Image (tube, rainbow, N blue to C red):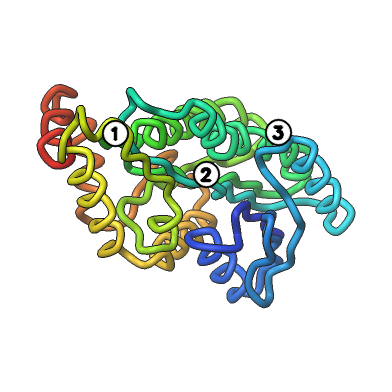
Amino acid sequence: MSLRIAVTGGSSGIGLAIARQFAAKGHTVYSLSRRPSADGVRHIPCDVADESSVRQAFAALEQAESALDILVNNAGFGISGAAEFTDLDKAKALFDVSYFGLLACVKHALPLLRKSASPLIVNVGSLAAALPVPFQSVYSSAKAAVSALTLCLVNELRPFGVRVCAVLPGDVRTGFTAKRDKSQEGRALYGDRLERAVARMEADEQNGMPPERIAAAVCRAAMKRRPKPLFTVGAGYKTLLVLSRLLPARWVNRIEGRLYG
C-alpha cells in the first residue's frame, strides 16, 4: 500500500535520506523545505520557523492528498559554544526551527493525519536529549524539549489512533557538522576546553553512521503498530541510552564532562 508522507527538512542530511528511502519503496513523499529534495520526492516550499508558511504548506498538501499517513519532523540546525556567551537571537532561532517549528507542523498536520487509517508522527531528535553535551547546551536543550513533547503527544493523541515516536540519533555523518554555527567567544576564559570539545564532537560526527541507517530505522518504525516512543540506532548508542536511564544522573553527567568538558 502506498503511503502519503511529509518530511520537513527533506532536502539534505537525514531528512533527504528518509525521503529517498520512502520514495524508493513506492510511497508518495513530499519534502516540506526551503529547497527542493531528490528526484521522486515532491516539493512544497516551507519555512518551519514561520507558522504562516507552515499553514500554507499543509493547505497545499491538503489540496493534493485526501489524507496524510506519516509526518516526519526533521528540520533543524546546530549551534555550539559556551552557554555563558550564547547569542540569544541565535538560540531563539534554533528553537524556532527545532522545537516551535516542529510543534507548528504537528498542529497543522493533525487534521490531515486524523483522516488516515493508521497515522504516524516521527520526530527526529538526538541522543543529546538524554546525554546533554557540554558546549552544545542550546542544541541539547532543544532536543530534550522534542523528546518531552513526543512523550506528551503519545498520550494526548492515543485516543485518536495517532502513533507518535522520536528517533534519537547519535553521531551521523552529514553536512550538518559543517553547517553548525560555532562560536569561539569566551575562549580566553574557558581555554582550550571549548575548542577541544567542539573538535571531539565534530570528529565523532564525521566518523559517525551514514544517514541512511537512520532512514532505515524510521521506515521500520513506520511499519510497527506500536513503535517505541523514544529509540536510537546502533548497538553502542542503544547501550548508552539504557545506561543514561539506569545510572545516577551525577555519574552520567561526570562521564559526559570527562569526554567533552
**Which of 100 and 18 lies nearest the eye of the viewer?**
100
The image quarter containing residue 24 is: bottom right
Could you tell me which quadrant the N terminus lies in?
A: bottom right
Residue 74 screen position, x and y as percent: 54, 49
Q: Which residue is mark 2?
A: 123
Select label 2 or label 1 by which is in front.
1
Name the residue rendered at 49%, 26% in the picture. Answer: 88
Residue 173 screen position, x and y as percent: 35, 63
Closer to the chain start, of discs 2 and 1, is 2
Visible residue check, residue 80: yes
Query: Residue 132: which disc?
Result: 1
Under mark 1, the amino acid is Pro
Visible residue check, residue 2: no
Tell me whether the residue at label 2 lies in contact with that at label 3, contact meaning CB atoms closer than 8 angstroms. Answer: no
Could you give the CA–CA distance between mark 2 and mark 3, rounded to whole angstroms?
13 Å
Under mark 3, the amino acid is Lys
The image quarter containing residue 257 is: top left
| Drawn side of residue 150 relative to residue 180, left or right | right
Q: Which residue is mark 3?
A: 107
